[in-house]
Image (cartoon, rainbow, N blue to C red):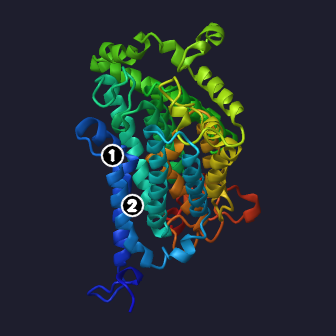
Amino acid sequence: MRTWAERTDVVTEEGAAGTPLSLIYRRGLVIFAIAIFFTGFDNYLEYKVLPLPPYYWVLALLVLSLPLLTGRHSNPAELIKAPLVRWCGFYGVVSTVWFFLSSQTEVAFQWFQTAVLSILFVGALIIVFADPRVHRLARYGVLYVVLLAIVLNMVDLVRPGTFSDFGGRAAGLYYNPNSSGVALTSGMIVTIGLLKRRSLHWYVLAVGLGVLLTFSRGSIIVWGIMVLWLMWKRDLRVGRFLETGVVALIIASSLLFFSGRSESFFRAAFAPFDRPDAMERLVLRRSQIGADIRAEGHRLWLMQEAWRKFSEKPVLGHGVGATFEWRADTSTHNMYLLHLTEFGLIGLLIFPTMIVSVVRRPGPGMQSLASSFAVLLVTWGMFTHNVLDTRHVLLCIVLVAAMVRRRDENSDDAPVPEALDRRAIHAGFHDRRPASRLRTPILVRDTSTESRR
């Protein structure tokens, strides 16, 4: 007898095929995951409302996702073949072995727990996103959250301290400005294919505004790199992008002028520059290289210290959590140096193999999304050490991995049977040119509606 999750149709009173119960349940879990984790609500709840550790939410998602394992799309025998699942096994084994090689202090155990929690979170999301029919729902959910995050960052700017406690740097529900910046940029790459050409440039600029308000150097640089990448791939047009930026600036300036709130807005906008390290957050003066590099906690000092500790034990490293036990109050701000210092030479494989497991062998129409997301992850790894323990980033990683791997006729994002030209898509007509002469749709453009016209 089949379980409820194996039912593929529910017959309605009219006799037509309805939505499967398992699909309704899966969609509910998708909405739950995005509403709790991608919004940063779990962190906001912990730091601002009540001390509820995020692992309660992760365990809840894991338990709720287990019934889906009895369904056709979440067959454990099939899921175990997924490259990302195998990477989780590799990461789990390495983290366990290197915990016993660490100092085994409370700090080391805490970061070992963090690694285990990330693996469980990824596993739960792999089950939830295993059905291609929920991919479009997830992408639209991410899109709406990105737009909401931009608005909340603007509120955080006008009313400092509403969400962020980092001295005039906007963060929204993510609490940490750096987390807000990485969420916006990751969400932009995942959702950019849902937009038409005429709204694409406005969307990218809006994300850029939200990232700028975080006053995070890494986020601003990564957003700029991704814009240049999209321009190089001709997903963004340079001239149209600049024109849209000028128009947006004129509109914003006019609204501020006629609203009579321009003075208070600019006072709030330039508040972060009153910080003693304001310019240091945006530029690296030549005098800093000689003097400030010796200051503990400076990013160049952290890189130098990480490399020194790696040189001491290049083969086995210092163990899990070693970069959180040194003199500085933060880690390396670099995924590659973090893993080299803690895991030795084998650590050099952890982050790159994760990226490969996400984007390897992309299906038809997925090459553009896979390459852009790979560039995003490679770049982000140079500016933060939190990629593998930031849940909104992990959600995007699992979603992209599921989209890249699972492409069939049931997918909401499946490419249309006949190749369509971009202008023809918007005009509602098929292009009769050979498919070999047509370029890949923009980051998996959603053409399911236009193609039926």
The span from disc 2 to disc 1 (Cα, nearest Å) is 15 Å
Residue count near mark 1 (Cα–Cα under 10 Å), binned few <14, some 14–19, many ≥20: many
Which image quarter: residue 158?
A: top left
Answer above or below: position of 378 versus 367: above
Query: Which sits in the foreground, 451 or 273?
Result: 273
The residue pinned by badge 2 equals 30
Left or right placement of residue 31 versus residue 347 in this view: left
Which disc number belongs to residue 179?
Answer: none
Query: Which sits in the foreground, 84 or 27?
Result: 84
Q: Give the residue drawn at x 28%, y 24%.
A: 159
Left or right placement of residue 252 versus residue 224 in this view: left
Q: Give the residue drawn at x 69%, y 47%.
A: 346
Which element carries disc 1, helix, strand or loop? helix
Which image quarter: residue 293?
A: top right
Query: Which sits in the foreground, 272 or 315?
Result: 315
Quarter of the figure that contains the N terminus? bottom left
Disc 2 residue type (three-letter): Val
Left or right placement of residue 352 versus residue 8 in this view: right
Is residue 19 in view? no
Sequence-wise, the earlier of marks 2 and 1 is: 2
Which element carries disc 2, helix, strand or loop? helix
Q: Position of residue 311 (x, y in %)?
A: 71, 31
- Mark 2 vs mark 1: in front: 1
Q: Position of residue 433 (x, y in %)?
A: 73, 63
Disc 1 residue type (three-letter): Asp
Q: Position of residue 197 (x, y in %)?
A: 55, 47
Furthest-left residue in this view: 50
CB-based contact (under 8 Å), mark 2 and mark 1: no
Q: Give the residue drawn at x 39%, y 62%.
A: 62
Which disc number belongs to residue 42?
Answer: 1
Q: Give the residue drawn at x 52%, y 50%.
A: 190
